[in-house]
Every structure is written in C-alpha cells, then in structure tokens.
Amino acid sequence: MTRGPRLAAVDAARGIALLGMIAVHSLAEESAPGEPTTAFAVFGGRAAATFAVLAGLGIAFMTGRRRVRTADFRATAAMLAVRALAIGAIGLALGYTDARFATVILPYYAVLFVLAIPLVLLPSWAVAAVGVAVAAGVPLLTHHLLPLLPAPSLDNHGFADAVAHPVRLLTELTLTGEYPALAWTTYLCAGLVIGRLPLDRPKVAVTLAGTGAALAAGAAAVSWLLLNVYGGLAAIWAAQPGSALTVPETTELLNLGGDGTVPASTVWWLAVDGPHTGTTPDLVGTTGAAVALIGVLLLLERLRTASVLLAPLAAAGSMALTFYVAHLAFVNSSYDVYGPGLGYALQVAAVLLVGLAWRATAGKGPLEALVTFLATRAKRWATPRAQPVQAR
C-alpha cells in the first residue's frame, strides 16, 4: 500500500484548513450587515471542523489504521493521553490571547483526544455508529442542559483557570464552549473511520468525495426545509422575546452562526445549520464538507501536475500546529499592523514558503516534533516488556 501519496493528500487537506482558519480570524466576516463575506461563507465553521476530522484520521494512522487490540490498549491510551496533555498545555499557554481575534481551539482538542481513547478499541462500524448517535443526540442533550449549566465565558483560558475553576473549564470545553468536544466527537469518529479505509484506492476517494458532498448538500437542504417550509424560522422569532438574545443578536446568529451552541428558547434552534451552532445540520454538513475535501485531494494527488501544486499546502499542513500557534501569536502582537487583506496575504505567503523550506531541511515542525516525542515516550513507557525466558 503506497503511503506517501495518502499522507501528502491528508497534509494538503490540513494545509487548506489552516489557511481557512487564518482567513476566518484575519478577514472580515460581513460584507454588509448580516451578509457573510465569501471567505467566511466558505471557511466559517468548515475549517475548524476539517481540522477535527483530520485529528481523527491522524489517530487512525497512529494506531496502525485498525482496531486497537486489548493487549496494546495501555500503550495506546498513554500515547493519546500524553498527546492530549501536551496539546492542552500549549493551548493554555495561549490563554493570554484575545478571544475577539480568535478562540484557541487546542484545549478543546485536548478533550477530544481523551474522548478518542475508548473509541480506538471499537471496530469501524461501531465508531461510525457512535458518530451518528453523537450527531443526532448530543445537540438535543445540550439544548436541555444549557439552562442548568453556567454560561460559558468564551474567553481564551490559561493555566490559572484550570487550577481555579477546573469543573467550569471542563464543562465549557466539553459542552458549552466555542468548539464543544462532546458534540465534536462526530468529527473525530468520521476521521477515525476514514483513516482505516484503503485510501490508496481511487474508488474509496471517489466514494468519499461523493458521500461528503451529499452529506453537506443534504444537511443544508434539510435545514432550509425545516426553517422555511415547516415553520422553524417563525417559531424562532416567536420565541425571541423570551430569549437572552436581542433582535440584532438573533439576526446575527441566524445569518453568521454562533459560538458553539444555540439558545434554549425553542427546540427549533436545532434546525439551523450556521457555523459553530453545534446542531445536527451543522455537524453533518461540516463533516460532509471535510470528507468531500479529503476525497477530492486524494484524487488530485494521483495527478502529477496537481501533486506538485499541492506540495506547498502539504508542507504547511505537516506543521499546522506550529503555524497555528505562530498565527495566534502574530495577530495578538504589535507586529500585526496590516489591513485584513494584506495581513492575510502575508501570513499565507509565510506559511507556504516557510513550510516548504522547513519540510525540506528540518522535517517536522518544532511543536509537532515535541508532541510526538512526548507521546512516543509515553507509549514506550506503557508498553509491557517481554519477560526473559528462564533456562531450565
């Protein structure tokens, strides 16, 4: 089985997600009041979701692209737990950044890696079933729990928050925050199943592209029907006076998306499919977009010309963690003195050029190397040692 092209396509998908996330953070969201810009309409919600799907796919690669045996579970669990701790620590170190520029996703990813630990024991069909159950059930569960839970701060949390308010922080990372890990297990399951497929086969790539496109289009169609034909939109506006949102805030949520969840004022909010609303249409649609992207890139990787053009994206994607942290540090620094368009263009150029140069010389990105080193050491430490054979 050819490994290089498969990994190059996955890295390219990660590179596109990285550029998309930078676009969401750097460029304007609205072209007119209530109207999303082209960049936000394309990447809003989808870039972050693609990262999460690729995280699941990466876990599949780490675990040999198959169900983990019980005998190997201790070592695998240690590897994933330490990876979660490392990524979470990097995320908490970015707690000084301003959430108005970008909400740091890494602490949420840390919880996702912990949630992945039991999933690696399951066969692919069971992982898929968990993903479907989460997409269908967790939004409804969250909708009923929200009135009972503390309102999320939606700030970027640091180590002090983890020490002073660990339960509140865990609740936000898991259920109520910008990237709620429990609902986002949908993406994790999708990536884990995809990573176990024979991705070098063109038929698999075509199936992924077609299935992903169908899921994305189907979720949007169902949401539109529920809101505009079956009365969902009218019910949302009828419940608006009892909501915590003002009329402009309700309009913004409907047109531009939310901050991880939707109001509990009416169950019809669960029919919207806006970015970061955490509803079933949102989860299914963004999963579909990520799956379609992976399928298309797997097909393009088979074309020699396209593979050359994808090389800068693949190089950037191979060190997405390092570039993501650098991006957050940049937009929160005094060096970001550029307008949105020029600032974004400069960041894209830096990511693509530095990525190519770094990959050609040093290989892994520095943060990727650090996380891999720690996770690998944990796996070795937890691997049972063979008992010496005693002579009789």
Image (tube, rainbow, N blue to C red):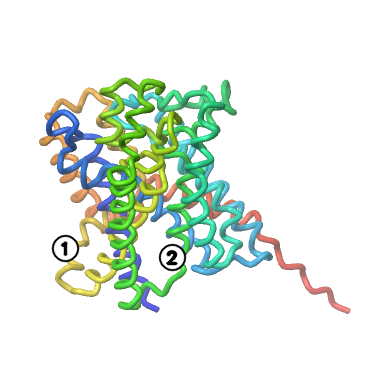
Residue under pointer 2: 195
Image coordinates of residue 142 in percent, x first then y, are: 51, 37
**Residue neighbourhood size for the residue with mark 2, other residues' Cα within 10 Å, grouped as few (<14), some (14–19), many (≥20):** many
Left or right side of 302 for 267 = right
Image quadrant in which the N terminus is located: bottom left
Image coordinates of residue 18 in percent, x first then y, are: 28, 47
Image coordinates of residue 323 in percent, x first then y, are: 30, 43
Identify residue type, mark 1: Leu
Tally the marks. Answer: 2
Q: Which mark is residue 275?
A: none
Q: Nearer the viewer, residue 265 or 315?
A: 265
Image coordinates of residue 92 in percent, x first then y, are: 46, 31
Element marked by disc 1? helix
Task: Residue lying at the far front in this picture: please name it.
Answer: 230
Q: Residue at x 13, y 41 (%)?
A: 345
Element marked by disc 2? helix
**Residue neighbourhood size for the residue with mark 1, other residues' Cα within 10 Å, grouped as few (<14), some (14–19), many (≥20):** few
Identify residue type, mark 2: Gly
* Sooner in the amino-acid sequence: mark 2 or mark 1: 2
Left or right side of 41 for 72 = right
Q: Is residue 373 above or below residue 214?
A: above
Q: Is the C-beta separation of discs 2 and 1 under 8 Å? A: no
Image quadrant in which the C terminus is located: bottom right
Residue under pointer 1: 309
How far separated are the C-alphas under marks 2 and 1?
24 Å
Q: Nearer the viewer, mark 2 or mark 1?
A: 2
Left or right side of 7 for 60 = right
Q: Residue at x 54, y 52 (%)?
A: 116
